[in-house]
Image (tube, rainbow, N blue to C red):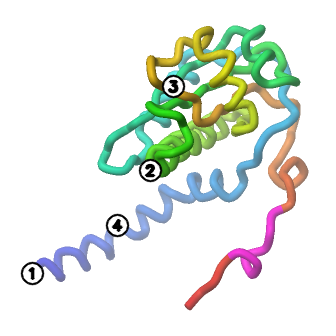
């Protein structure tokens, strides 16, 4: 009986699932790390949506170890990520501990970072993930950012408006081929 139920559900849900997820698949297959940001503020309603995407990310044991710090102060954004333009927002993803030793926490935070990154692009903004400034953030900016006690930054996501009609083909870095990266057995 269970087998018939699941087969019936699969028969009816696969076409619906495929249609609903074509937009998600297109977003994932066509994203790119933006470089050509232009000035312009991100509305708070869009920031709330982007943060909710991070909150909804999966985590091991549903622990949700992350904390999000939304940095809208342009002087602070510019000190952390050079080349930022007015209106860029940084989302600092932090977790309890030193940010290096707990692999599960790092993976969980990475899933939240990816969700934030993709949500920003789904809303039409550019987004870029940074890990290079993390040591500087943890050594110089934790107090200014108001990171929770015992937390260290794990990654940053820069979000901003983009210039003109930039697309993933012309703006993205070259990717390795599937033949180089995938093994099927």
Judge the density around disc 3: few (<14), some (14-19), many (≥20) Cα neighbours within 10 Å. Answer: many
Residue 72, horizontal then vertical, whole percent: 66, 13
In front of the other: 33 or 98:
98
Of tags 1 and 3, which is closer to the observer?
A: 3
Q: Which quadrant, please, contains the C terminus?
A: bottom right
Residue at mark 4 to residue at mark 3: CA–CA distance: 35 Å
Residue at mark 1 to residue at mark 2: CA–CA distance: 38 Å
Disc number for residue 68: 3
- Tell me where residue 71 sits by quadrant: top right
Judge the density around disc 1: few (<14), some (14-19), many (≥20) Cα neighbours within 10 Å. Answer: few
Of tags 4 and 2, which is closer to the observer?
A: 2
Of tags 4 and 1, which is closer to the observer?
A: 1
Judge from the rendering whether residue 52 lies leftward or rightward of residue 8; answer left or right. Answer: right
Residue 101, horizontal then vertical, whole percent: 51, 45
Q: Is residue 152 magenta?
A: no
Look at the numbered discs 3 and 2 and tell me whether their residues touch, using CB distance below 8 Å.
no
Residue 168, horizontal then vertical, whole percent: 80, 51
Judge from the rendering whether residue 148 lies leftward or rightward of residue 141; answer left or right. Answer: left
Residue 43, horizontal then vertical, whole percent: 62, 16
The tag earlier along the polypeptide, 4 or 1, is: 1
Q: Where does label 1 land, which residue?
A: 1
In front of the other: 49 or 35:
35
Residue at mark 1 to residue at mark 3: CA–CA distance: 46 Å
Residue at mark 4 to residue at mark 1: CA–CA distance: 18 Å
Q: Secondary structure at mark 3?
A: strand
| Span of residues in magenta | 175-181
Placement of 158 over or under 168, stated as above or below = above
Disc number for residue 104: 2
Look at the numbered discs 4 and 1 and tell me whether their residues touch, using CB distance below 8 Å.
no
């Amino acid at each position: 009986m269970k087998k018939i139920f699941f087969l019936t559900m699969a028969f009816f849900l696969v076409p619906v699932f495929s249609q609903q997820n074509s937009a998600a698949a297109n977003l994932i297959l066509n994203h790119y790390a933006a470089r050509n940001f232009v000035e312009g503020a991100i509305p708070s309603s869009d920031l709330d949506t982007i943060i909710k995407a991070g909150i909804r990310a999966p985590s091991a044991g549903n622990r949700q170890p992350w904390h999000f710090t939304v940095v809208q102060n342009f002087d602070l954004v510019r000190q952390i990520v050079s080349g930022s333009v007015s209106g860029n927002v940084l989302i600092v993803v932090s977790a309890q501990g030193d940010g290096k030793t707990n692999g599960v926490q790092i993976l969980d935070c990475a899933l939240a970072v990816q969700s934030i990154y993709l949500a920003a692009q789904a809303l039409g903004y550019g987004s870029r993930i940074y890990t290079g400034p993390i040591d500087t953030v943890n050594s110089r900016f934790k107090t200014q950012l108001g990171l929770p006690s015992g937390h260290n930054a794990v990654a940053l996501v820069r979000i901003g408006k983009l210039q003109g009609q930039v697309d993933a083909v012309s703006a993205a870095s070259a990717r390795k081929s599937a033949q180089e990266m995938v093994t099927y057995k």
